[in-house]
Amino acid sequence: MENPRVSYSLVIGEYFVLLDTIIMKKTLIIGLVVVVGIVGLMLWGQSVQTKAEPQPSGEIRSLSAPETAYNFGAISMRDGTVEHIFIVTNSSEKDIEIKRVFTSCMCTAAYIESANEEKGPFGMEGMGYIPPADETIKAGESRAVRVVFDPNAHGPAGVGAIDRLVYLTDVSGNAFQFEITAVVTP
């Protein structure tokens, strides 16, 4: 006759082996689910990530301006927005199609003004909708580019020297650039 203690020991031993196998399988399944989930999130994140707009690739040599940079000097946050108008001229014999206008910072907006129309505001890429410029500057014609700077856009952290850019880009991705500078005071 078998010793009942031995058979119980075998049953208990087999139970623990079976339990250990189940725990290992669950751990393996949970690990696989976590890995698949992480890979899935990475792929999803890549697919919804907005593609960065290409930066201007060259210079629009056919455009000219009497000034391309303006220094506001010291401006107070108390006084609110400041603006400056740049004049840009198509000095070539061909029409130039300006596709996009954008700024280097959300605190700056630009507008294209012709004799009978104003387009804009054009702001920083990635900070909301920027309308297409779709502005044709015929040979010999000029446009006003009004640049508006808001010294309060960054709050108290915005005190100090600023340097902002405005880009006009053509259908080929070439750009013409304006620059504003200032020293923001409280």
Image (spheres, rainbow, N blue to C red):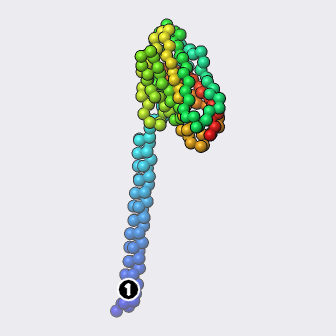
Rendering coords of residue 14 (x, y %): 39, 77
Residue 97 visible, this angle: no
Q: Which residue is drawn at the image coordinates 56% and 14% (left, top)? A: 64
Residue receiving disc 1: 8
Vertical placement of residue 73 versus 6, above or below: above
Q: Residue furthest top?
A: 93
Vertical placement of residue 139 versus 183, above or below: above
Residue 158 visible, this angle: yes
Quadrant of the rendering where the N terminus is positioned: bottom left
Q: Is residue 82 left or right of residue 36?
A: right
- Toward the viewer: 137 or 30? 137
Rendering coords of residue 170 (x, y %): 48, 20
Q: Residue furthest front?
A: 79
Q: Which residue is drawn at the image coordinates 50% and 8% (left, top)? A: 140
Q: Which residue is drawn at the image coordinates 50% and 18% (left, top)? A: 144
Q: Residues within 10 Å of mark 1 (few under 14, many from 20)?
A: few
Residue type, mark 1 in image:
Tyr
State how many labels appear. Answer: 1
Q: Residue furthest bottom?
A: 1
Q: Which residue is drawn at the image coordinates 41% and 76% (left, top)? A: 16
Quadrant of the rendering where the C terminus is positioned: top right
- Toward the viewer: 120 or 175? 120
- Toward the viewer: 38 or 13? 38
Q: Is residue 56 left or right of residue 35?
A: right
- Circle 1 — which element? helix
Q: Is residue 67 left or right of residue 134?
A: right
Rendering coords of residue 4 (x, y %): 36, 90
Rendering coords of residue 151 (x, y %): 57, 36
